[in-house]
Amino acid sequence: MCGIIGVVGHSPVNQSIFDGLTVLQHRGQDAAGMMTCDGGRLYLRKNNGLVRDVIRTRHMLRLLGNMGIGHVRYPTAGSSNSAEAQPFYVNSPFGISMAHNGNLTNARELRDALFRADRRHINTDSDSEVLLNVFAHELGRRAELRLGTEDVFAAVAGLHQRVRGAYAAVAMIIGYGLVAIRDPNGIRPLCYGYRDSEDGREYMVASESVALDALGFTRVRDVAPGEAIYITTDGEVYARQCAEHPQHSPCIFEYVYFARPDSVIDDVSVHRARLRMGDRLADKILRVWPEQDIDVVIPIPDTSRTAALQLAYALGVQYAEGFIKNRYIARTFIMPGQKLRTKSVRQKLNPIPSEFAGRNVLLVDDSIVRGTTSGEIIRMARDAGARRVYFASAAPPVRYPNVYGIDMPAVDELIAHGRSEEQVAAAIGADRLVYQDLADLEASVRESNPRLGRFDVSCFIGEYVTGDIDHAYLAELSAERNDGAKAQRESADEGVPELHNVN
Ligand code: AMP
């Protein structure tokens, strides 16, 4: 998963992009980058690491210009090589750079076609570089010496015809402006807004509305699936539907886990959706387990708190904070190797024994993926003196990999793959396990926006909204994502100095 941002302003945008990326840091801690445009010059800083570590004062001083884009990266199927940090850049036509969130499912075919038919060189394994080159090629085919608005939209239409998968992207064209692009399924989020400065109206495009809020921008709306929004350096805004058959299918995992609760995505407050997940989970518990004997509901920090609080309220059971999280430890999920992950859970979360002693506790998490966290936390709850340990997941069983930009493990590393709910309960050591039903999860989100007809729920049901995922693709993905492959890549990846980097 990644976060993207783009700003067209009337004064230097480096600080706004830096601050916006920091607000989007939860979407990726692996690499960060910013590219700004000052007249005919581009300035770039990108590397592996957190925003504040990658972009230092000395870089900020040289990231000049009133227009720019930024990116935070979460590793997906590709490598964690620093040369794959974004934004990417191509010099023809005009000079274009791009930041992308998502994953293209036909990247390999596109890469071949770009090389053979379009005579373009791709320098990394990143599908984002592929996306940029497709856009550049489509633009180059149409534009004359000067770029017209129609050329921009025609290029996006051409891109939609060639590209499959998930892509929310912002492209910056030197001397012209920014183009926000969302795939025809609208899988990954993208919105835009404005802020009035003394010199006129400024615009921002961002993965999540929280970046707009934090910088004093007013959210206008989400970019529609298949739509392109072209914001010129003069502050003119043009919008056009560029896909032939857009069908909105946003990724439901954004609401479950990824997005910040204070964001609004596709007109749905993430916070409110999570509250409803708690409500519906409580309804299910009352339905399937009327004689429940839960003494206390304890969330697994942080994401599940919202759902857990509402669940406890709806059950009429006490809610308590039982685990204290150390914020300064690396995230467990992306650490390669099971041993490392297990050790890290213990370092990250510490129980408060008095909240557990002698009680039947219901632990609540947003989702169970590998089961590492859940299994370890259940053990910790027992060690802390709990009598019985029950577990509830605000999402249904995760049984299939995500191919649209979420770093899910290889399929056989998913604890619910090939297991019934009872078997998962036994595997993680829970006395009882309750999963949210998929229909309830969907209803939790849809309630705020009934126009959301379908969601991408592929990691629960194994059906992929782009319709192009076959067994061979999944097998390849699995080979790239298993722990062995990840460990090998970690040791092989050395930071490659970037041609245009501001060091
Ligand atoms: P586990 O079941 O041990 O794999 O851990 C599941 C926990 O990881 C849940 O609490 C989620 O909050 C979190 N999680 C779920 N999906 C992801 C993901 N793709 N990347 C990082 N963390 C995730």
Image (tube, rainbow, N blue to C red):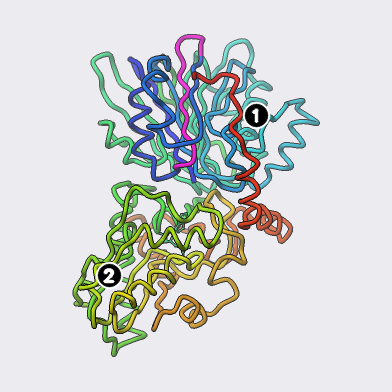
The numbered mark, 2 or 1, whose residue comes first in the sequence reads 1
Q: Residue at x 23, y 65 (%)?
A: 321
* Residue 249 in picture, x, y percent from top left: 50, 53
Q: Residue at x 65, y 56 (%)?
A: 484
Magenta span: 29-41
Q: Is mark 2 within 8 Å of ligand 1?
A: no
* Residue 139 in picture, x, y percent from top left: 63, 24
Counting other residues with Cα less than 10 Å from the Cα at mark 1, is it few (<14), some (14-19), or many (20 or more)? Answer: many
Q: Quadrant of ligand 1?
A: bottom left
The residue that label 1 is drawn on is 133
The residue that label 2 is drawn on is 298
Counting other residues with Cα less than 10 Å from the Cα at mark 2, is it few (<14), some (14-19), or many (20 or more)? Answer: many
Residue 4 image label:
none
- Using the numbered discs, state the Cα–Cα distance from disc 2 to disc 1 in whole angstroms: 48 Å
113 to 94, vertically: above or below:
below
Name the amino acid, label 2: Ile
Q: Is residue 240 visible?
A: no
Q: Residue at x 21, y 70 (%)?
A: 319
272 to 295, vertically: above or below:
above
For the residues bearing labels 2 and 1, Cβ distance under 8 angstroms: no
Q: Nearer the viewer, residue 402 or 380?
A: 380
Q: In this image, 209 relative to 474: left or right? A: left
Q: Splitting the image into 4 quarters, where does residue 443 fall?
A: bottom left
Circle 1: element type: helix
